[in-house]
Image (cartoon, rainbow, N blue to C red):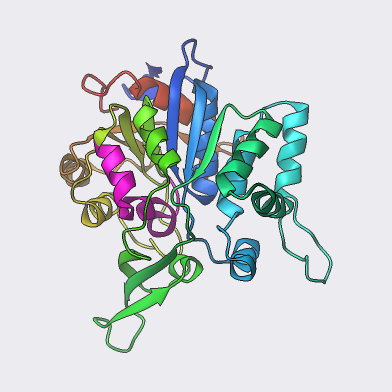
Amino acid sequence: MTTTDSSGYSVSDTSVPAKPIPRVACLGGGHGLFNTLRSARIISDYVSAIVTVADDGGSSGRIRRELGSLPPGDLRMALAALTRDSERGRMWEEVLQHRFGGSGALKGHALGNFLITGLAQVMGSEMAALDEIGRLLGIQGRVIPMSNEPLDLEAEVLGLEEDPREVVAVRGQVAVASTLGEVRRVKLYPESPAASQEAVDAILDADLVSMGPGSWFSSVIPHLLVPGIVDALNRTEAVKALVLNLVPEPGETAGMSLEHHIHMVRQHCPSLQIDVVIVDLSTMPVASTRRHIDRAAAALGAKVIYRDVREDDNRGRWTDRHKPEKLAAVLQEISGGVRNLPER
């Protein structure tokens, strides 16, 4: 729900909703998905995390290269985000996220990555391993890879050569996320990968589906390059929300405007239809710019709403993170439909 402040803007009511949303599916990866899942678990009885599987850096990349398995890092973070808010849950979250120190072969590896990968080898399936860990943690929902095969990300990038118009192919999620050039388009290898059936089912069964925030080209858009995911998004009866980032990210989205983020979604997936685009009030642009955002969203069939979803540091200064309680309240607000929602 929202209330209206003295300026006439809608302000999120961060109290826990009395009536939870039965099923929520959240698409993404990394820290952006982590925060969205923290929001979703507040207002839903059952949360499905549908996670990108193109990571090739750090502990995940090392495990992937050595064992040929799905990169476990984003899957681990989703499990951590959905652990119960209790003393035992916080202990298990710390266990999953714990990284080994020292100077040997284990340095930098996350314990949860080993747990996922080792259990998958024992059980014969990453999905079975994730479900078993979910039961161990008491998670109400599932953590689901968007595809059952590890994928590679490649971007077409401008501005890396002497001729700024020359397009350069940059391969790998880490390289794309940290590029100093302008990302124009991304693709997955193998192209048009099969979606996991569990991801498709979670989207079709959901009452609310969210995409974003997060690394736009390396965590959000990759889902839209999986035909089975797009088909499920267009068939589901769930309310579909696109949550925009609070700030451009250094590297892949440096200098990108809000409407450019939306344009990139449509450019990569022209058939996609969305119900609502959520923009934080602190990033609310002037009226002339808002018209550009509205037009970009309308091309996806979406309505734009501006809400207070940003976290502060308790000293009145904004952070670059969404506050889970605030975003949860907005997700609850839109769950019944968006036609009569005020813009702000």
Q: Relative to residue 301, is residue 169 depicted above or below? A: below
Q: Residue 309: which quarter of the image?
A: top left
Q: Is the magenta stretch mostly helix, strand or loop?
A: helix
Image quarter in which the C terminus is found: top left
Q: How many marks?
A: 0
Task: Decide which of 59, 275 is in the foreground and name it.
Answer: 59
In this view of the protein, which residue sits in the foreground, 48 or 301?
Answer: 48
Query: For the point 64% across and 70% down, which residue is it?
Result: 66
The residue depicted at 62 percent of the width and 50 percent of the height is 124
Residue 69 position by quadrant: bottom right
Give the residue drawn at x 54%, y 35%. 142
Kindly give the residue lying farthest to the top in the view shown: 18
Question: Dividing the picture into quarters, in which one does residue 333 lie?
Answer: top left
Whole-percent x and y of residue 241?
33, 35
The x, y position of residue 27, in whole percent, is: 42, 42
Q: Could you tell me if residue 289 is visible in this image?
A: yes
Above/below status of 60 relative to 10 = below
Magenta span of residues: 213-234
Does the stretch in magenta take in 42?
A: no
Q: Position of residue 47 (x, y in %)?
A: 50, 30
**Which quadrant is home to the N terminus?**
top left
Magenta stretch: includes residue 227:
yes
Q: Is residue 180 visible?
A: no
Q: Where is residue 13 in the image (x, y as percent from the top left)?
A: 46, 19
Up-down relation of residue 39 to residue 1 (above or below)? below
Residue drawn at x 30%, y 54% is 257
